[in-house]
Amino acid sequence: MIVTEVMTQPAVLILLGPPGAGKGTQARMLEEDFGLVQLSTGDLLRAAVAAGTEAGRQAKAVMEAGELVSDSIVLAILRDRMAQADVAGGIILDGFPRTAGQATALDSLLSDAGQRVTAAICLEVDDEAMVGRVSGRTTCAQCGEGYHDEFKRPATAGTCDKCGGHDFKRRADDNAETVRERLKAYHAQTAPLIAYYDGKGVLERIDAMGAIADIRRALGAIVTRVSA
Ligand code: AMP
């Protein structure tokens, strides 16, 4: 008797979009809504910088200038993270891939594991609004919840809504000048990936200029559809 087993592969979602589009915010919500794991190469690199590893020392100045860290450093960091057990149930890649080389390296990494990209979701926004969005960002130092000086203040000033923490941090590269450099890097090196994933038939687009809750719902509908 031949038994045909239908294997559903764990979701591999990519969030594409310029700095400030809301990739990190929405990735954290997708973690909550779908039990996926957020993999942010920006977070992994910041952790490497904070830990003072060799990769972190090489990445630090590049990140502060708003440029892209080399593919070799980013891929090494991502490979290590993807080897950990908690990613088995599906991942949301936030801030990766950012270059054509990273996209093809991801394809081969996934194909070695019998997987492929489930969907690359492009968060569409206006560039000029991104400078304001990114410049006002802060994060709770304790739980990582994101806030904005203008658009998302904690209910009680100085206290995190989620964990009650009082310490908020601001990223070194979240200033208007560096954001403009990061936007340039996005358009030159990352935006071409939209056509790459369109060609593979896995591109989804979403208007990401609206309210966070509306974008969360729209994204959720896409994730439900592509994971079916
Ligand atoms: P992010 O937290 O995604 O905004 O990333 C912050 C900074 O980390 C970027 O401006 C880059 O300098 C670096 N970075 C993060 N992810 C990547 C990546 N996939 N490739 C190259 N550089 C990256």
Image: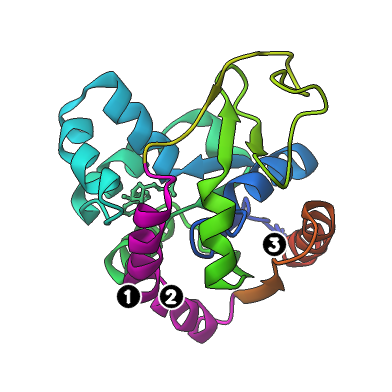
Q: Nearer the viewer, residue 86 or 177?
A: 177
Label 3 sits on residue: 2
- For the residues labelled 1 and 2, the Cα–Cα distance comes to 7 Å
Label 1 sits on residue: 188
Q: Is residue 143 magenta?
A: no
Q: Is residue 176 magenta?
A: yes
Label 2 sits on residue: 191
Residue 15 visible, this angle? no
The local secondary structure at tag 2 comes to loop
Q: Is residue 29 left or right of residue 42?
A: right
When the figure is inspected, residue 135 is found, relative to residue 187, above or below; the finding is above
- For the residues labelled 1 and 3, the Cα–Cα distance comes to 51 Å
When the figure is inspected, residue 116 is found, relative to residue 31, above or below; the finding is below
Highlighted range, magenta? 173-202
Q: Residue at x 74, y 35 (%)?
A: 153
When the figure is inspected, residue 28 is found, relative to residue 6, above or below; the finding is above
Q: Earlier in the sequence, mark 1 or mark 3?
A: 3
The local secondary structure at tag 3 comes to loop
Going by the numbered disc 2, the residue's amino acid type is: Ala
Across and down, in percent, residue 92 comes to 58, 49
Across and down, in percent, residue 49 comes to 28, 29
Which image quarter: residue 56?
A: top left
Across and down, in percent, residue 91 comes to 58, 46
Across and down, in percent, residue 173 comes to 37, 44
